[in-house]
Image (tube, rainbow, N blue to C red):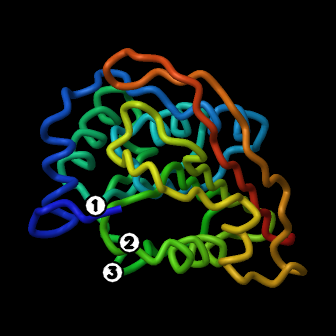
Amino acid sequence: MSTPETTDAVTYWQDVYAKRPVAADPRPNVRLTEIVSCLRPGAALDLGCGSGGDALWLARRGWQVTAVDISAVAVERLVDLARSGGQGERVDARQHDLHESFPPGGFDLVNAHYLHTPFDLDRSKVLRGAAHALRPGGRLLVVDHGSTAPWSWNQDPDAYFPTPLEVAAGLDLDPSAWAIERAEPSRRIATGPDGRTAEVTDHILVLRRAS
């Protein structure tokens, strides 16, 4: 995957979100709603919050959400949506570059949906930090692309999609302290931003920190 010809990651993602229409009610990711609906609300960290659908969905269900994104445009839009929707006190949205540092705090859930970028990012380091940020009994949910959607910014025909177990192995966590609750591919019909639909594969990994 080649790096776009732009000055840096911040500029690139600023432009991506600046060009997108503001979503009045952004949708949460399907895998988040499937997996987290049965969990007791607590403190959640949303890594790469994007348009804010996941953060708002969690907040509406009683979670206290820290949402971070490299794009100030995305963060500002989420702040406005949270306030207008009565969730301003439940959503703390911040601009944060995970290539440089990791958000402080302890969490019952860390949500990392499609944390992919064409720029340098040590994902294993970020996700390892996420696992260590979990409180006892907390969960790390990692959902990655397992296929290329027609609307994806990455159309590399040679792209390799690591399996959930490969992602877990790369974190090098103590198995006595972090258990794998789920690690599998799963197919679904997805709708892209332009309204097109296609079958896509998600790679789902759920890790739980020991109580």
Disc 3 + disc 1, Cβ < 8 Å? no
Side of 166 where 26 appears, left or right:
left
Residue drawn at (28%, 43%) of the image: 79
In terms of secondary structure, where does tag 1 sit? loop
Q: Is residue 107 above or below residue 157?
A: below
| Closer-to-camera residue (54/135) | 54
Side of 147 where 68 appears, left or right:
left
Rate crowding at label 2 as few (under 14), some (14 to 19) or many (20 or more) other CA atoms within 10 Å: some
Q: Amino acid at mark 1?
A: Ile
Q: Which residue is mark 3?
A: 100
Q: Amino acid at mark 2?
A: Leu
- Number of callouts in the render? 3
Residue drawn at (34%, 38%) of the image: 51
Residue drawn at (22%, 54%) of the image: 13
In terms of secondary structure, where does tag 2 sit? loop
In which quadrant of the rendered image does the N terminus lie? bottom left
Real-space Cα separation, disc 3 to disc 2, in angstroms: 5 Å
Precedes in sequence: disc 3 or disc 1: 1
Q: Amino acid at mark 3?
A: Glu
Disc 1 + disc 2, Cβ < 8 Å? yes
Q: Which mark is residue 98?
A: 2
Q: Which residue is mark 1?
A: 70
| Closer-to-camera residue (55/43) | 55
Q: Position of residue 18 (x, y in %)?
A: 13, 41
Q: Is residue 200 above or below residue 197?
A: below
| Closer-to-camera residue (171/210) | 171
| Closer-to-camera residue (194/94) | 194
Rate crowding at label 3 as few (under 14), some (14 to 19) or many (20 or more) other CA atoms within 10 Å: few
Rate crowding at label 1 as few (under 14), some (14 to 19) or many (20 or more) other CA atoms within 10 Å: many
Precedes in sequence: disc 1 or disc 2: 1
Residue drawn at (24%, 36%) of the image: 80
In terms of secondary structure, where does tag 3 sit? loop
